Image (cartoon, rainbow, N blue to C red):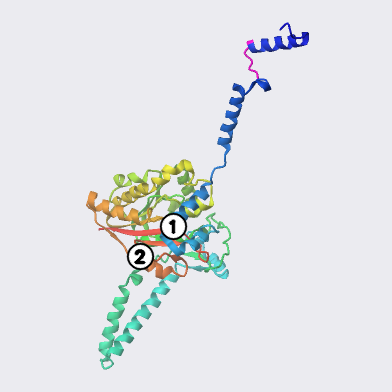
Amino acid sequence: MAALGSAGRAAALLLLRRWRGGERLLPSPGLGPGPRRHRHRHRHKEKWAATAPRIPATRLALHHFDTSYSLQLKDLWPSVRAGLLCEQKYGALLNNFSPVSHVTQELELLNATDFVSEAPKKVQQLQCGAAAGEAGRGEGRSQEGSGEGRTVMQAETMTQAEMSPVLRASISPNIKCYTFPRGDITRFRPARPDTLGLLDYYLMDAASLLPVLALNVQPDDFVLDLCAAPGGKTLALLQTGVCGHLAANDISISRTKRLYQILHSYVPKEIRETVSVTSCDGRDWGQVEGGTFHKVLVDVPCTTDRHSVMEEDNNIFHRRRTKERQMLPMLQLQLLMAGILATKPGGEVVYSTCSLSPLQNEYVIERAVEIAETQFNINIHVEDLSHFRTLFQDTFSFFSDCRLGELVLPHLTANFGPMYFCKLRRM
């Protein structure tokens, strides 16, 4: 220190005091990297790793669908993909608890039609066409037959026509849902309250109504909606006007609140009080009220394909939800089994998802049928729903190669769905 000038000594003493007091110093430029520089550089790397851009869940979902659905749907996938990525089309489910005559007139002036009421008209056309065709062929084969013989033959033909799956279809005349024609992207106005405060219609994906129509509720049926929230299908079940008792359940308390809001907005108090709303784990329902219901709707949680490619919020393709997504088929199977066990012998279950995935659709059905027989000694018959394709082909695009049940495919001209539904009968 003697070699330093007075100013240098003072500076050196100051540095020495600071060091002894525990203050950490940056190394001199010529002394090489010290520990401070290493720590600074390490912190910088940690920060860089924490702020590195993550792949959005919507992009992960689309990549997953491109990989799997292109193999399943083949040449149909590009058009289905375009539909998923474009604005969804809606239907207006009329609220029978509110005066609807003026609403009906308003919607028809906009060129919207009730796709449900069109089904019986098609049934009549098919009846007449089938009977006339068979009668014509029979008359050609035997033109010398007596008039009485032809009358008997036509009656037999009519009976055969009436026994075909299309003509056995029973569609509730009380459910009315208006949609715009194919290619028409007109939007419905928001629902409006009537003088009693009840909204005049409920906007929903019209394909979501198909599982309710497939359930075919009959007068005084005890009905269970096992995964009811947010409430569109529950509301549709009430629109039939024939439920003897309706139980609406959802495991999520927050989603059950949304169900209560829907019921309060659309259903009079005296009808609301007949609906039993619960927030139980649907997987346990078969143990709680086994063999109780005539009809059970099991609209399970799924990958919600359209939401997954369009919305980041609550997206099941977020990396933190990977395990949850992988466990979906198991959850779906457990819920379907609970629905089967909750059904009376002779009762019916409709299983539905808003996914294109066979792992969540047909494979769940096949496994449930197998488990019901091997573990519970319950025989299950998978019902033929192909008549839905015939009845509603003007409104929806159906996948013709679905092995079990029916699948509505999104399409730019009829951008509903995806919606899978399959009907099971407990023997």
Where residue 212 sits, quadrant-wise, is bottom left
Q: Nearer the viewer, residue 391 or 250?
A: 391
For the C terminus, give its image quadrant: bottom left
Q: Where is residue 117 shown, x and y percent of the image? A: 45, 69
The residue labelled by disc 2 is 385
Q: Nearer the viewer, residue 155 or 273?
A: 155
Q: Residue furthest top?
A: 2
| In the image, residue 407 above or below residue 368 | below
Q: Residue furthest right?
A: 6
Q: Secondary structure at mark 1?
A: helix
Q: Nearer the viewer, residue 68 or 190?
A: 68
* Amino acid type, mark 1: Tyr
Part of the protein shown in magenta: 20-25
* Amino acid type, mark 2: Leu
Residue shown at 30% from the left, 89% from the top: 139
Q: Earlier in the sequence, mark 1 or mark 2?
A: 1
Q: Is residue 76 magenta?
A: no
The residue labelled by disc 1 is 69
Q: Where is residue 413 shown, x and y percent of the image? A: 52, 66
User: Left or right of 397: which side holds 350?
Assistant: left
